Amino acid sequence: MAATPPPGAVRPGGRTARVREAVLEAAADTLAEKGFDGLDLGDIARIAGVGKTTLYRRWGTPGALAADLLHDMAERSLPRSRNGDIGQDLRDNARLVLKTLTDARQGRLFKALIAASLCNDQAAQALRRFYAVRIDEWAGCVTDAIERGELPTGTDPRRVIAAVSAPLYYALLNTGEPLDEAAADRAATAALAAARAGALSTT
Amino acid sequence: MAATPPPGAVRPGGRTARVREAVLEAAADTLAEKGFDGLDLGDIARIAGVGKTTLYRRWGTPGALAADLLHDMAERSLPRSRNGDIGQDLRDNARLVLKTLTDARQGRLFKALIAASLCNDQAAQALRRFYAVRIDEWAGCVTDAIERGELPTGTDPRRVIAAVSAPLYYALLNTGEPLDEAAADRAATAALAAARAGALSTT
DNA sequence: GCCTTAAGGGAACTGTGGTCCCGATAGTGA
DNA sequence: TCACTATCGGGACCACAGTTCCCTTAAGGC
């Protein structure tokens, strides 16, 4: 019982790749504009200039399309800061997250992708992978800081980076508190204080 | 131009109240079981044993129904701890949040309601109100602790409580990190360290 | 450059989510 | 208790998201 490969996997080049690119771009635009529940495969087909049948055959559901977009986004990682000072690095990270979440297009896109991950298992898995990549990239700052003696040995690098983002996402998703530079700086300072106190260790 | 009152507002007692109760219960069950995108008004009507027309007339959309459920949930507030020790109080709060998020039914329900809030403005507003009520209730712990001199004056009570929940929700929604008692205790300890360091002040 | 067939696209079709109409039921004020 | 009408509920109806069919195009191996 040889499993049939998913459509697009056997001949991924040329036309197939162009279709995927156009579709993902249209999907990102639509998610940013209308949110996850406004993601209609028929609309996407029209906007991307491809056949509706293609959308249903290759992706099938809005959730699977969002998952593919997340895979695509995880590929392009942003380089982290290297200030030689953990306080400054965490602040840079907080500012970067802030900028992403408050940017009109990016902020709405992230909200829509989180909504997708809450409605669809494929999207949920892709979202976790996306954040794992992002966090791993920045965890290097913490590793370096530990080596420099700025933070206790045993500090968990990923947890420190996650601790910076967490209050900003909590404000975005749960409380609706305003997201501004003061909030970003508070997030960085709080994470640093927690790390110094040994509250974010691996054990 | 007198605005027509929304259906159910003029005669909210008796049958109308019973219908709302049955519908909200069915909605909560369905959200917990199938998530927000599985919330079909026709299904809810069948489960609740009321007319489909009633669902569409009184709520109209899944988002509005989720919003009404959130309003209902915000009414019933849970009492906070009063240990006389902020470390213990924050730990209790973290354990309570953990218990809610890891409970099979409650955890799924919260995820679904957050998804709803990301797809619908009414639900988003209702969710913010829900968390405002919850956070205000527990903020009293921090106010008391400041008076007892356990935390610096100028500490923002709501921010401290939010700082406890934030990493737990971040694990639930973004990274998929395991949610266990160790995670809850880390969240409480980290928030306490940040507050003691003055990183969560009102200014 | 040729051949095989994976992948795309147009168009017709259909199941069902959501609307509309109207009679039945019961909350509310007197 | 009665009258008025807000609200409920059943069923017909309709638009369209999602499927299916089948022909066309071009990717990839030789």
Image (spheres, coloured by chain):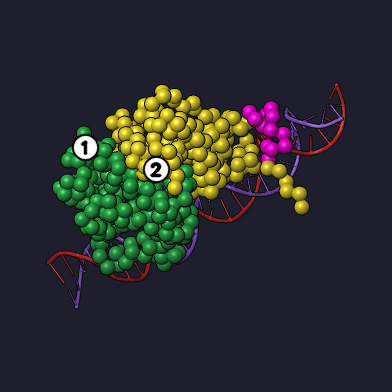
Chain colours: A yellow, B green, C red, D purple
Q: Nearer the viewer, residue A10 or C5?
A: A10
Name the residue located 41 percent from the left edge and 23 percent from the top edge.
A83
Give the numbered dot on residue A200. 2
Q: Quadrant of the N terminus of chain B?
A: top left
Q: Position of residue B198 (x, y in %)?
A: 24, 37
Question: What residue span does the magenta drawing correspond to?
Answer: A7-18
Name the residue located 38 percent from the left edge and 51 percent from the top edge.
B184
Q: Which element type, helix, strand or loop, lies under badge 2? A: loop
Chain containing mark 2: A
Q: Is residue B94 visible?
A: yes
Report the residue marked by disc 1: B202
Quarter of the image where one finds residue D24: top right
Q: Is residue B64 magenta?
A: no
Disc 2 residue type (three-letter): Leu
Q: Position of residue B196 (x, y in %)?
A: 25, 41
Per the model, the C-alpha gap separating discs 1 and 2 is 24 Å
* Image vertical order of residue B22 relative to residue B159, above or below: below
- Of marks 1 and 2, the one in the foreground: 2
Q: Which element type, helix, strand or loop, lies under badge 1? A: loop
Q: Nearer the viewer, residue B182 or B17?
A: B182
Q: Position of residue D25 (x, y in %)?
A: 73, 28
Disc 1 residue type (three-letter): Thr
Judge from the rendering whether residue A12 lies leftward or rightward of residue A48; answer left or right. Answer: right
Name the residue located 29 percent from the left edge and 64 percent from the top edge.
B17
Q: Position of residue B83 (x, y in %)?
A: 23, 58
